[in-house]
Image (cartoon, helix red, strand yellow):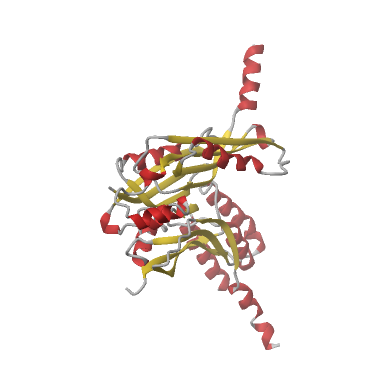
Amino acid sequence: MRSLFLLLIGSILLASCASINSVSLTPIPANRKTQVRTEKSKIILLGFNFDNDFVDEAVSDLTRQCPNGQVTGLLTKDENINYFLYFVWKKQITATGFCVPVAASTTSTKTKSRKAASNEGTHNSISESEL
Amino acid sequence: MLRAFALRCAFIFALFSTGCTHSIHIANVSDFAPTYKEYSKGELVKAKSEQFAVMGFVTETNYVDNAYKKLMASCPNGTIQGITTQYSTSHGFLSWTNIIEMQGLCIR
Amino acid sequence: MQKFFYLPFLLLVCSCAQLHHVQLGEIMSHPDYVQKPFDIKISESGINLGEAADVSKILLRKDRHSDVDNLAGWIGLFQIGPRTGNPVYVKDYAKNLIHLIYEKCPSGKVTGLMSVRESRKYPVISGEIVKVTGYCLIRKGS
């Protein structure tokens, strides 16, 4: 009987309600061989939160997983997970995407001039070459 | 006279407002880079995923990932550009349905 | 004195804008292309049931006020759930966003996209707006 009571109390305390705050998605590449993923969260007690710096680590984490490529097809999910009577909640950011090598993300029919442009900056040059 | 008219108006309004309501929380459009293709050069692909919640008692949000996977499955060897992501809720009796809809142009 | 006559009317028509969400995309510029701006605005009417009940109370006798509250409460039970702005009665009003973008920029050379979700609030009703602005890249001289 006592264990049943403890189980009941435990399940009430640990039961959570999840809800989405925002979702965003960037263009999905054809090359989906290398998946990258990061999950960052922060526990907040009674709403006392003084910074959201935990989010910043997500970018560096993804960059580390894809040092020589472009992260694209990125699904970013910002969710709240509320625990017992909303006294405690968890802010969680999950980002899932694909690491595409820069050479693969551009077409094979790149001209010399486009190649020269790609040396200047990875992100823009890829887009420019496709124009 | 005015009161009777107001009552009738209130009744009609109440009748109409009993319908199902919805709320769009987010509607995003992703970039068209790096492909920048015309509509005729691709194929419109769609994915939708739902989650039914009774008074908010749901423990995960995997339906978002399911919509993402469905969208990718509908364009296996192509790039998807201009993806619109819509997150909405359809309200109901002490419950609601969260909906994620994604659509984009599959360039093969 | 005549100015004050219009005051209630002005109060009814003035709206408050509320921004819910905004997102920016890549911005690309190229010497061979000019950026032609475009914007798309899709709006649907939202209704605030609580405010509608308050307004109807003004028109009804005091002894009917509790009926209005009960009715609004009952309707509210069928409309429970998270909301951004006021709820609307049309489900997929922002469904054709991609088609509308291609109408504005048939070439698909779209950059600097900004997606905005906002509300324009009036008494009882509101405009639930999805707005997308961006630039269509057009080759110089074409």
Instruction: Please tell me which residue is depicted at 26% across the width and 58% down the height of the picture.
Output: B40
Nearer-the-camera pick, C136 or C23: C136
Q: In the orientation shown, which residue stands out farthest toward the left?
A: B40
Q: Is residue A42 above or below residue A2?
A: below
**C135 to the left or right of B7:** left
User: Foreground: C4 or B47?
Assistant: B47
Q: As drawn, which residue projects farthest toward the bottom? A: C2
Residue B79 % position (x, y)? 34, 47
**Residue drawn at 38 percent across, 44 percent down:** A103
Q: Is residue A86 above or below residue B13?
A: above
Q: Splitting the image into 4 quarters, where does residue B32 fall? A: bottom left
Q: Position of residue B23 (x, y in %)?
A: 49, 53
The N terminus of chain C lies in quadrant: bottom right
Report if residue A56 is visible in the image. yes
Residue C122: percent from left, percent from top? 58, 67
Residue at image position (37%, 46%) is A105
Drawn side of residue C6 relative to residue B90, left or right:
right
Q: Nearer the viewer, residue A90 or C50?
A: A90
Q: Position of residue B54 (x, y in %)?
A: 51, 37
